Amino acid sequence: MTSCSDTGRSDAVPGGLCLSGTAPSGTPTRIVIVDDSVSSLAALEALVRGIPGCAPLPFARSAEALAWCLRNDSDLILLDYHMPPPNGLEFIAAYRREAAHPDVPIVMVTTSGSRDVRLRALHLGATDFLTKPVDESEFLARIRNLLRLHQSHRILTTRSQWLAEEVARATRTLVQRERETILFLSRAAEHRDPETGDHLVRMAAYARIIAEGMGQPADFVELIHTAAPMHDVGKIGIPDHILLKTGRLTACEVAIMQQHTVYGHEILAGSSSPLLLLAAEIALSHHERFDGAGYPHGLRGGDIPLAGRITALADVFDALTSVRPYKEAWPVERARAYVLAESGAHFDPACVEAFRARWPEIREVAARYSADAVPVPVRAPVHS
């Protein structure tokens, strides 16, 4: 009789269909046989050896068999009902509860013809039954059919996993292209309104930190980090004589400048992409104020989209701490004090609290990119 230690390997890959010989990896199809009767065990082992490519793994002690099955791969289990603990039903219950391969067929081989036993076995996860004494023709037919089904299930599972990986890879590619599109459009807007080169990087990082501090889901945090740099893309639609004016803007010019929020929304809206839809929302709402004194629609409080409230704080803080054509950079502590003072007025108090709680990270981002800020000639502010 073959010892189970001779053929069992915990690192083996489950074999293929017995009728084709061995699995493509060369591993035989492994059939575990569990029976405390030496004669029954030998008879079942002989039947399994008669199937090309199948390796029987006999166990006279069900506890040892269960421990082995929970640690190793098998392709089918032949199991007696009447055994010392665990009996057949207890074996099935434990295996289905803990095994990593719940689809492995289990055939109960027993002298018991009790309908109750069969129903309990099916309920616990038995796949089929054979009655002792086992008929050779019936045995071969049932085992071959079960192995075919098991192999088909394994192939479908492998293909499903492969398809899922391919879909995930394609999705990552599409998301990366979306991000590149946003980056390029953001750079185009930045080139029309000269500011410090790292403005987009900093304010996107601030938006991410604030969103995280507010306990927002990881998906939203990732989206706002990617979409926030599009907040000023609408400046593409502002005439140069206003956008680049060196003097103070007139009231009419300020009104035109404020339209960049609407233009940005028009550029980005209408997409089915969650990323671009969020970018459109940010473009439209990032100049709204929590007290309702902002533009373009004078929204107040929770009527302002969350992404707009977060981006408003991130954008203003970066503007305050950056050198602009019309101002010098504020020290970060002064800018921090301004943000805290504007809680409930310019900014959402929840955003301000997250900003305050995550201040060390905010300050680290500001310090990391501050060296790139280069002073330029002063001109009157063009933003309102």
Image (cartoon, grey):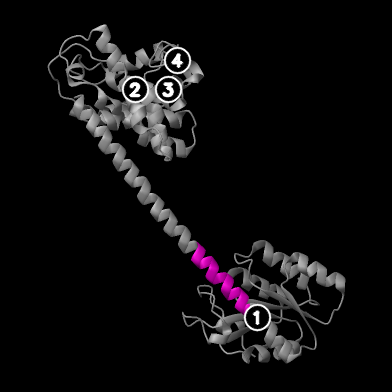
Height in image: 227 above or below 61? Answer: above
User: Regarding mark 2 in the picture, which secondary structure is present there?
Assistant: helix
Please tell me the numbered disc located at residue 89: none
Of the residues shown, which amino acid type is indicated by label 3? Arg
N-terminal of the pair, mark 1 or mark 3, is 1
N-terminal of the pair, mark 2 or mark 1, is 1
Q: Measure the alpha-carbon separation of dots 4 and 2.
A: 17 Å
Q: Which residue is mark 1?
A: 145
Q: Measure the alpha-carbon separation of dots 4 and 3.
A: 8 Å
Q: Which residue is mark 2?
A: 261
Q: Residue at x 73, y 87 (%)?
A: 138
Which residue occupies the foreground of this view, 278 or 129? 278
Left/right placement of residue 24 relative to residue 150 reads: left
Residue 292, quarter of the rendered image: top left
Task: Please provide percent x and percent y for residue 172.
Answer: 38, 50
Q: Which residue is mark 3?
A: 309
N-terminal of the pair, mark 4 or mark 3, is 4
Q: Residue at x 77, y 85 (%)?
A: 37
Q: Which residue is mark 4?
A: 290
Of the residues shown, which amino acid type is indicated by label 1? Asn
Predominant SS of the magenta segment: helix
